Image: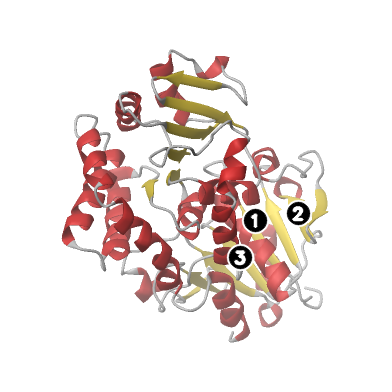
Amino acid sequence: MTQKSKHWDIFCCVVDNYGDIGVTWRLAKQLTQEYDLKIKLWVDDLNSFQHILPALNPNLNQQTINAITIIKWDNINPNSWQAGEALIEAFACEIPESIIEQLAEDKTNAPVWLNLEYLSAESWIEDCHGLQSLHHSGVKKYFYFPGFTSKSGGLICEHNQLTIAKHHDLERSEYLKQFGIELKETNTKVISVFSYESSALKALCKYWQTLDSETHLLVPLGRSLNSLLPAFQGQVENVNIGDCFTVGKLQIHILPMTDQEGYDKLLSSCDFNIVRGEDSFLRAQWAQKPFLWHIYPQDEHAHIDKLEAFNSRYLDSLPNSVVNAYQNLSLAFNQDQEQHIVTYWQQLQEYEQALLSHSLNWPNKALNGSDLASRLVEFVKKR
């Protein structure tokens, strides 16, 4: 192994289109911009990556954007990787065997090797965070668990993000005008939807059509539309970016996929956000608006355990009436309880102001004084 350089390597396999690469790209940017670290980001699927980073050319094996070197992973060979200070396997992806062989050849100069796990609010991660494991190659590897407590790896959040979100909220009227939305009625509700398919969403859509007040759904092209468009007699394959459909006082606006900064602005400009995946889930919290998390389904309902663990932590300072209303809606949405979802939605609206106040206070409590990038840098320094 040649002499170690100062850079960090981050490896990412794109599994759920935008969640894994979304978190990884935000981490790479924050480490570069706020800690002046040189980052090499290795990604296996540049076509999916391009949806959230339009400047990316998926045909290039290597390119530099925002001072970050982005490398197409499937072209890696033993000579193209050089040891840096840290090596991160994002979300338990496995680095190429050729790199492991190099690590094993010179263990004393090996980078700090981290397995960055998925975010969880479950309490057991505190016991596993930072644990060292000896890889079969003989090289040390650490498990790093992002989470909501001071004993976890923290949450990814740029240092000025909460201030930016408040600024976006102040400009929401101007932002919404691009979709033809005028906030003339005080009870107009604007909701963003970035979810998986859901019969609960379909039922809510039918309910919103019956209201006397306006409801606007802002929906990027994607899977949510399979549940929403039938209510408008529309088909996903026939819609285009910029289309708008109306039934009663419900309107659905079809948005293009956007970069991460554009998505953050969208979340801050809505009254309520329905999100999926890890990256959108956290950004909805930093937007400081009420939200629902459509969690990625897992075998044996493990995702429900993760959802309830988060809800318990998120709601623990609220009155029981608000807690019950939110939990009922959250579980009904994630379990496709089409017959109950409208009742639970109506119940939650009674606590709209309490939930909004809570969403403003929650981010600082969740961050516990430091974010994931800050804790990662300290973790690597101490190894």
Amino acid type indicated by mark 3: Ile
User: Is there CB contact under 8 Å for labels 3 and 2?
Assistant: no
Q: Judge whether 119 appears above or below 129 on screen.
A: above
Q: Earlier in the sequence, mark 3 or mark 2?
A: 2
Q: Earlier in the sequence, mark 3 or mark 1?
A: 1
In this figure, which residue is indicated by the disc labeled 3?
A: 88
Looking at the rendered image, the disc whose residue lies closer to the viewer, 3 or 1, is 1
Where residue 330 sits: x, y (%)?
28, 46
Q: How many marks?
A: 3
Whether residue 242 sits left or right of residue 370 in the image: it is: right
Where residue 10 sits: x, y (%)?
65, 62
Amino acid type indicated by mark 2: Ile
Disc 2 secondary structure class: strand
In this figure, which residue is indicated by the disc labeled 2?
A: 70
Q: Is residue 286 visible?
A: yes
Where residue 280 sits: x, y (%)?
50, 50
User: Is there CB contact under 8 Å for labels 1 and 2?
Assistant: no
In this figure, which residue is indicated by the disc labeled 1?
A: 25
In the image, 85 versus 38, the foreground residue is: 38
